[in-house]
Image (tube, rainbow, N blue to C red):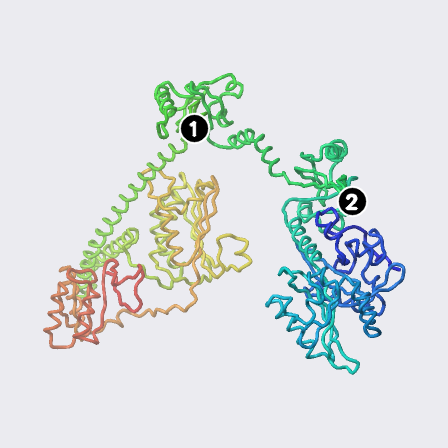
Amino acid sequence: MAVQAAGEKRGSYRLNRKIPYRRIFEASNDAFLIFDLKGVVREANPAACKMYGYPYEEMIGLSGKDFVHPDYQYLFKQFVKETPSGKPFSAESVEIRKDGSTFNIEVRGSVSEYEGEPYILAVIRDITERKLAEEALLESEEKFRLLAENSFDCIWMLDTMMRFTYLSPSVETMLGYKPEQLVGTKLSSCFKKKEYLKVGVLAAKAIKNYKTFTHITFETRMLNSKGEEVDVEITGRTLLSSHDKLIGLQGTTRDITERKKAEEEIRKLSKIVETTPEAIVVTDMQGNIEYVNQGFLTLGDFDDDNSLIGESVFSFSDEKGVRQLKEEIIPTIVSEGKWIGEISVKRKDSSMFPAEMVCSLIPDEEGRPKYLLSQFLDITRRKNTEKQLRESEQKFRDMTDLLPQIVYEIDIDGNLTYVNKQAFESFGYSQEEYEEGINVLQTLIPFDRNKAIENIESVLSGKDVGTPEYTALRKDGSTFPILIYASAILKESKPVGLRGIIVDITERKQTEKEKARIEDQYHQAQKMESVGRLAGGVAHDFNNMLGVILGYTELALGTLDPAQPIYSTLQEIRKAADRSADLTRQLLAFARRQTVSPSVLDLNETVEGMLKMLLRLIGEDIDLSWLPGSGLWQVKVDPAQIDQILANLCVNSRDAIAGVGKMIIETKNATFDEDYCAEHTGFVTGEYVLLIVSDDGCGMDKEVLENLFEPFFTTKEVGQGTGLGLATVYGIVKQNNGFINVYSEAGDGTTFRIYLPRYAGTAAQLQKKDLTDQVSRGYETILLVEDEPSILKMTTMMLESRGYTVLDAITPGAAINLAGEYNGEIHLLLTDVIMPEMNGRELADNLVSLYPDIKRLFMSGYTANVIAHRRVLDEGVNFLQK
């Protein structure tokens, strides 16, 4: 007895009896069984139920192995295993009916897949008669003929030349030929050439391997007496004599035209139904689900239809939807045959969505209502659109209320018909006052009203008036500048009003004023820059004169006895000249005309050398404290840049102190690791020498700190500051790979911390020697080139007084001529840098060809590009600062 498979739920598969192609499916003489991939029956046609002796309701849900004789169970396992891979399956087996009787079958299996869900279609033929016929042939020719002549299939025999030797009477029904018309003819006469090539190959293979060949079943197309093709299924085997000699071939042919039509109809209609994006559900008249397509599974986010088949359609809607189904939809369909409307549908996760549903009846063969066909369309988007349309005005209001500008609409008379919330704040009127009625002219000063009327008329007539500027009038009488953007509101191509935006440009006006202030400040900075350039030029010329004074003073002192009264007088002159030279060097530094020449230095010594000048700079009212750190590391930086940093910071501190105050300069070492820098923004890992300048002045707020190092930013009055001091400090620190940290609060003073990288190398040790040890007589020849006559004369005298032979030239051209005419050796070129005709570097390059071993010493009062590269001296260049 067949037993229902454990755990299998009864119910139909996708291919359900509601579909029109079911009629073909049910009319087939072959048994059709549809299995899932586990071998469980999901659908069966009447021929299958009749063949196995089961009612349809019992057949569904049984496992295919329940039908198979124990000796053939291996074939069913092979059938379930191989068929899903796409490999065609064909075999003969012995099956068991419900009543326990057995019968022979031939089964063919194939796999189909729609929307990713595969199933196995088995076409089963009862070949008991054929088996009996084959057995009867071995027993009695008479029995063979009786069976053959009454068989539905055409039984045939072929000799080894592929000629018909026998055909059963059913060939006339199948092909339209009487048996005697085909006996003696070749098999090829019943096929088109292309089809016969396939059949001939199979026949030749059977004849060649007749001793081991058993049988073969295949589908092809034969030609009937009218020349039309007929779909057939042929089963053939070899025909042997009693002595196992090949006599020919024998077999059966079955007309499978109806079966092929059924299969094709199943494929076509199933594919259409399954692939349509529209959700389809078929229920019985009580609302129990018989079928759902992939569209409904996707719509409701269901995994598969197994969980839905047999469920009530009422479970997929809410209380309102169930009432609608029972009281409206189903009665309407029964009475009118159709219903169209909206209903709420429940997804797998119990969420609801609105759907448009079209319901109609599917009648049975006699036209009586049997099924309800429902088609669903998700109208969530449409519903949302309708909702958005209903809410659009409110959304417009909400959005415009967030704008900082005034959004407005007026009618052709200038009455405000809409304003956003910004209008309440800007003009000072309440919402109730706007609702009572306010004309746009009330929001403008009287002087602008005529202009506004003209512009309104122009915009209504289609003219572009741009964005005119007006002065707005608040309810309290105060005013503010505005720009008005306007465009016409059209209805049926006619203007009915204006809409647009009113922009408060108060900040823009203030920005324009600030821009003018910055431009004035910039011009002031340009003036200061010009003053700096002038100061630098004056300092340079003054420095040359001081050089002459110092030179001649040194010469005079060298010829006098220290005991003479004039000796001390000359010493005072020299001291005054030295102090003047120091001042010119500082002036050149502040005018940014000095050569940037980094050197390894002790920051404590550099700061101490600057203290006297700083005291004069900040004045006597400010107490300056100097706290040098012990064991301070060395840094490599131009000492003049340190002077600039200290001068700028101290000047700022002085200006921040009103009256008496205190200023502190400190130095110390500092080391920062990665953990510290990760917690302190702006700090960089490494070892640094820290220079701290702090004061107890007025301090700075957050806004000032954020702009502190921007060029031209200053909090001082016009004419009192350029805004370049701290920018210069920042640039110097960055140039030397350091960083700055500033702490300040309004009223609590300011502290600048400047971190300069520790110098990792070893500084050259300068040996101090008694000058008298270095005073020796020279014997070499020096080519001296200087465009300033007084310096040329003074330097010549000084060098000659030391025993050197001096060839002096006032121009580079004269120097070249002099060198070319000189017959002796020239040991040193001592030349100014900036001169007419060519600079000192170019002169030196020209002389190398005449004197390859000549030494070169450059001197200058300020930087030249041949000396300084990016304001840093080139390596290996010997330079003497005047």
Looking at the image, which is closer to me, 304 or 2?
Answer: 2
- Where is residue 251 shown, x and y percent of the image? 74, 70
Q: Amino acid at mark 1?
A: Ile
Secondary structure beneath label 2: loop
Q: Is residue 318 left or right of residue 806?
A: right
Does 853 sit above or below residue 398? below
Q: Quadrant of residue 67?
A: bottom right
Q: Amino acid at mark 2?
A: Glu
Q: For marks 1 and 2, give the one nearer the viewer.
A: 2
Q: Which residue is mark 1?
A: 502
Q: Residues within 10 Å of mark 2 (few under 14, many from 20)?
A: some
Q: Residue furthest left?
A: 821
Q: Quadrant of the C terminus?
A: bottom left
- Where is residue 379 shown, x and y percent of the image? 63, 38
Q: Quadrant of residue 88?
A: bottom right
Q: Is residue 507 left or right of residue 343?
A: left
Looking at the image, which is closer to me, 500 or 824?
Answer: 500
Q: Residue furthest front?
A: 180
- Where is residue 640 shown, x and y percent of the image? 33, 56
- Where is residue 690 shown, x and y percent of the image? 45, 56
Q: Which residue is mark 2?
A: 311
